[in-house]
Amino acid sequence: MLTNWRFVDLTHVLCSDAPSWNGSCGFQMEIMKDYGENSGTRFRTHSMSLEAGIGTHIDAPSHCIQGGLTIDELSLKDLIAPCVLLDVSDKSHDTFSLSSKDILDFEERHGKIEESSFIIVHTGWGRFWKNPEAYRNNYHFPCVSQEAAELLLERGIKGLGIDTLSPDRPESGYPVHQLMLSSGKYIVENVANAHLLPPKGPYTLALPIKVKEATEAPIRLVAMLPKA
């Protein structure tokens, strides 16, 4: 029963001033028809223009890997998964990288990361979301190291999420993208409200717009937690 579950929205609101990778959001929404006195219609309708990798969004394997799965090919059994929260918000900074030691320290406290988990790295960077310039910060933001990504793949995870623009900074050459996506995993960027999750226990639903042959798509990311 749904009454036995509590839900947490892990998705940022998508709007024209949301932070983005290149500094230009690329999201626009325009009213096409509108209701009102003497309008001749009973409906309000919109058109939208946006870049696929905007807001809280998902990268499919094909985003980096030729021949990899596209958004419409991702399986629901992978997009719905037990969630593990790696909280490093007390130590992260603009050049911080999650290390394998951080993961091992987590496992010492909470037990080994289960196979088929979706991992969210909580850095606390979401506090800058309403200040796009500070959030982008000239591509200086907390990320994930290659060694940490390799260890997570050894654990057999489904996907990796983070509350920054990317698990990679550009100067690294994007090893986390290459490792995760070449292994058939997915990446979720710009996760919201990660601080509301416990280390273990929730399930996440990572549900993108199902666009044929897309390599990225906006997502509604939701966590389900059993009520005490």
Image: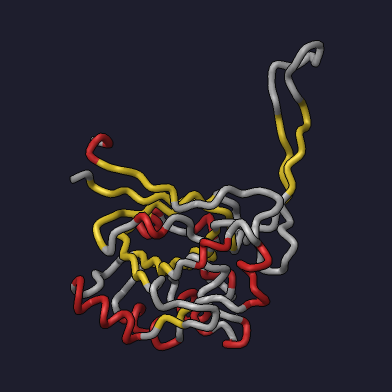
Q: Residue at x 59, y 64 (%)?
A: 215
Image coordinates of residue 2 in percent, x first then y, are 27, 36
Count of number-bearing discs: 0
Query: Residue 126, can we see it?
Result: yes
Say which quarter of the image contains residue 201.
Answer: bottom left
* Quadrant of the drawing holding the C terminus: top left
**Which one is nearer the viewer's eye here, 2 or 126?**
126
Q: Residue at x 78, y 12 (%)?
A: 37
Say which quarter of the image contains residue 90.
Answer: bottom left
Q: Is residue 174 left or right of residue 100?
A: right
**Which one is nearer the viewer's eye here, 84 or 69?**
84
Image coordinates of residue 131 in percent, x first then y, are 64, 60
- How does the figure colour the protein chain or chains? secondary structure
**Which one is nearer the viewer's eye here, 214 or 157?**
157
Residue at the extreme front of the image, as rendered: 90
Q: Residue at x 81, y 11 (%)?
A: 38
Image coordinates of residue 49 in percent, x first then y, are 73, 49
Query: Residue 186, can we see it?
Result: no
Say which quarter of the image contains residue 154.
Answer: bottom left
Image coordinates of residue 9 in percent, x first then y, are 43, 48
* Quadrant of the drawing holding the N terminus: top left
Relative to 164, say whether 148 is above or below: below
Residue at the extreme top of the image, as rendered: 38
Relative to 226, say whether 116 is above or below: below
Relative to 93, say whether 49 is above or below: above
Q: Is residue 58 left or right of residue 102?
A: right
